[in-house]
Amino acid sequence: MQNIIFGPIHSRRFGISLGVDLSPNKKQCNFDCLYCELGGAKSVASMEDVLSVDQILHPLLKRLENEPKLDVITLSANGEPTLYPHLLELITKIKEEIKGKYKTLILSNGSRFGQREVQAALREFDIVKFSLDCFTPQCFKKLDRPNKSLEIEQIKNGIKDFARTYKGELVAEILILKNLNDNLEEMKLLANFMREVGVHRVDLGTLDRPPAYKIQGVEHQVLQNLSSVFEGLCVSIPARKQITLEHRTLLSSEEDVLELLKKRPISVDEFSSLFDGEQICQKMLQNGQIEIKKVANMKFFAPKS
């Protein structure tokens, strides 16, 4: 059996994370995404290789005995974690043991959010992150290659249904691929959906690990351009080292900063790599014109609410 517990690792988007793999022995997923770093595998509708709750809980508690410095305990899988049939029992027992000392996070593809038993489990997590790369059926089937039991409308309705009762922080991730979903039309539809759902944060990214299939990511500037349609939402974009100081956008006044942040709050970590105007930001923080808003363990500059 491979390691069930991995880390802690430093996640730029969620802080210091201790990972829990609910499918350590093999990939079990209801998608076969083109970009999956786990490699290609036939999609499944349910888990065949299922660990008991104790098989997962025991090594986790053993790792927590030394009280590591953590921000989150992250449940994921070598595949899709909501396929794990004992998810509610597992997260309930984890929360009983940690007693609020750490936040809990699950990384899901969002495909089973309409299932009542899955919703009951997800409501126990402090942070729920789901992926939604496409809005249209054509894009979805080509990019995410879902199990034949899944349709995109069913998934979107499930996400909306879950969001109505969820009290934690809901984060959406969209992975952009060249010539697949890198167009404004698809992004506008996704942005409208994210606003309707009321997600707390949107993470826009592209390939940064070897994919399962022969595909291409997009340039950082493409991500920046596509982010413009997510007005009113906190959007995180991975900062790239190749963005040098001379290529930053100059913000010369408080009005420039406020106009930018009204469109969408900007991650504190990303701001200095994208814009020349951090001193103005610090002054506006002191004057109370803007604030730092913490969303799912990531800080954003935002207009004062």
Image (cartoon, rainbow, N blue to C red):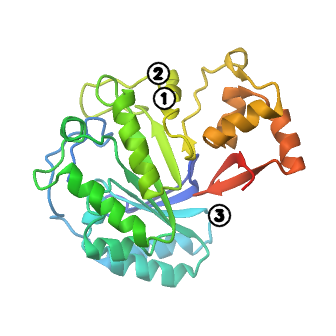
Q: Secondary structure at mark 2?
A: loop
Q: Report the Cα–Cα distance between label 3 and label 1.
A: 33 Å
Packing grade of label 2 (10 A; few <14, some 14-19, many >=20) is some
Q: Is residue 73 left or right of residue 210?
A: right
Position of residue 146 in the picture relative to residue 217 (left or right): left
Residue 162: x and y in percent read 36, 67
Give the quarter of the figure containing the N terminus.
bottom left
Residue at image position (69%, 21%) is: 248
Sequence-first tag of 3 and 1: 3
Task: Tell me if residue 78 can be seen.
Answer: yes
Count all numbered tags in the image, as a single digit.
3
Which residue bears the numbered disc 3? Answer: 69
Q: Secondary structure at mark 1?
A: helix
Which residue is identified by label 2?
Answer: 219
Q: Amino acid at mark 3?
A: Lys
Dot 3: element? loop
Instruction: Choose mark 3 or mark 2, whichever is in front.
Output: 2
Give the CA separation, mark 3 to mark 2: 35 Å
In percent of width and height, residue 110 lies at: 32, 56
122, above or below 241, in the image: below
Cβ–Cβ under 8 Å for marks 2 and 1: yes
Of callouts 3 and 2, which one flags the residue occurring earlier in the amino acid sequence?
3
Q: Which residue is mark 1?
A: 223
**Which residue is painted at 68% across and 29% down in the image?**
273
Which quarter of the rendered picture does the C terminus lie within?
bottom right
Circles 3, 2 touching at the beta carbon (< 8 Å): no
- The local crowd at label 1, few if under 14, some if 14 to 19, many if 20 or more residues have their Cα within 10 Å, is some
Q: Position of residue 212 (x, y in %)?
A: 26, 34
- How many residues crowd around disc 3 within 10 Å: few (fewer than 14), some, or many (20 or more)? few
- Residue 24 seen in the figure: no
Viewer-nearest of discs 3 and 1: 1
